[in-house]
Image: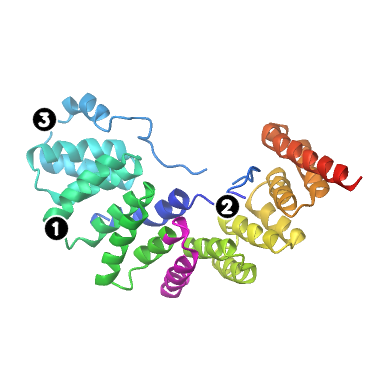
Amino acid sequence: MPRIKLLVSIALFLTLPLLLSNCVKDNNSLTSTSSDPTAKLAEANDPWKKLKMSRADKEGLPQDRLESLGEIALQSGDYESSLINFMEILKKNPQRYDLHYKVGVIFLIAGQFEAARKELALVLVHQPEMLQAHEALGLVHLQEKKYPLAIEEFQLVLSQEPGRVKSRHLLGVTYLEAGQSAKAVAELKRAVELDRRQVASYIALGQAYTKMKDYPKAIACLKQGLSVDPKNQKLNHQLGMALAGDKRYTEAMDAFLKAGDEAQACNNIGVHYFMAGQYEDAAKCFQRAIELRPTFYDEAKANLQRALEKLHQTHQGGT
């Protein structure tokens, strides 16, 4: 029962648009299904490669024009164009730490963590009071699984601004990823109290309770989230996980159906049947997933094969 991809699909989804706007603006052998678009620049291993190719077009433009183009590109999500414009300004004005911050966040979105860390560290040397830069640096550490460093950054922000929902949420997510579920619950509950409409915090809190096998609390908080956003697929997926963990398979199936298609739902329920030792029920679910979606064949077939092997072993042991 793999975990939801909190780092990108929750942390980045929740935080990065807000970071930018502040400046401008249990692992098992079976596979349950749950993609998240991230970086337009991710294909480039060298974060400077495209800049070198594009600078000639920018050199004659005045600084205010470059900044205007960069801001327009940033707001429209064209991070590559925004980066090129901002870097051209920084060539002549290296003390524009507001632009260094934006460049750092763009590198973070692109998955260029070393480049992001350098830009954000530079900002914080000169502007240590800039909370959103600490927040972004914490996200870099979180993405790199350097949990103590991420915790330190988020706690620093919260020491200055205890009601900052983004940092409270991200601190909870970091504790969750670090395997400290009880601390995660405490922080995520505070995040929800600060903003009752923050769906990402309900998802993470539900996951934390599910990891602790406190399924009733997981179900309750996820249903609270669904009262805010009834069609949210991630909420419904995590609710399915909690309900299945509580062996409420019919309700779990309904939740999984709202989170994806029927083939995925059957596969996910099959995983939980398998984990509960109900290998015949698991095999039926995996077979149904294959029938519903032949393109799902490899994943469901592998799960079906494992279920059949376990079923065979069980029958042999009983004879």
Residue found farthest to the right: 319
Mark pair 2, 1: CA separation: 40 Å
Label drawn at residue 26: 2
Name the amino acid, label 3.
Answer: Gly
Mark pair 1, 3: CA separation: 30 Å
Name the amino acid, label 1.
Answer: Gln
Residue found farthest to the bottom: 193
What range of the chain is rendered magenta?
175-198
Magenta: main secondary structure: helix
Q: Position of residue 90 (x, y in %)?
A: 13, 40
Q: Residues within 10 Å of mark 1 (few under 14, many from 20)?
A: some
Mark pair 3, 2: CA separation: 55 Å
Determine the residue positioned at 79% across, 52% down: 278
Q: Residue under label 1, please give it.
A: 127
Choose between 230 and 29: the one closer to the eye: 29
Q: Taking the image as drawn, is residue 57 in sight?
A: yes
If you read the primary sequence from the N terminus, does the residue marked by circle 1 or circle 3 appear first? 3
Left or right of 88 in this view: 285: right
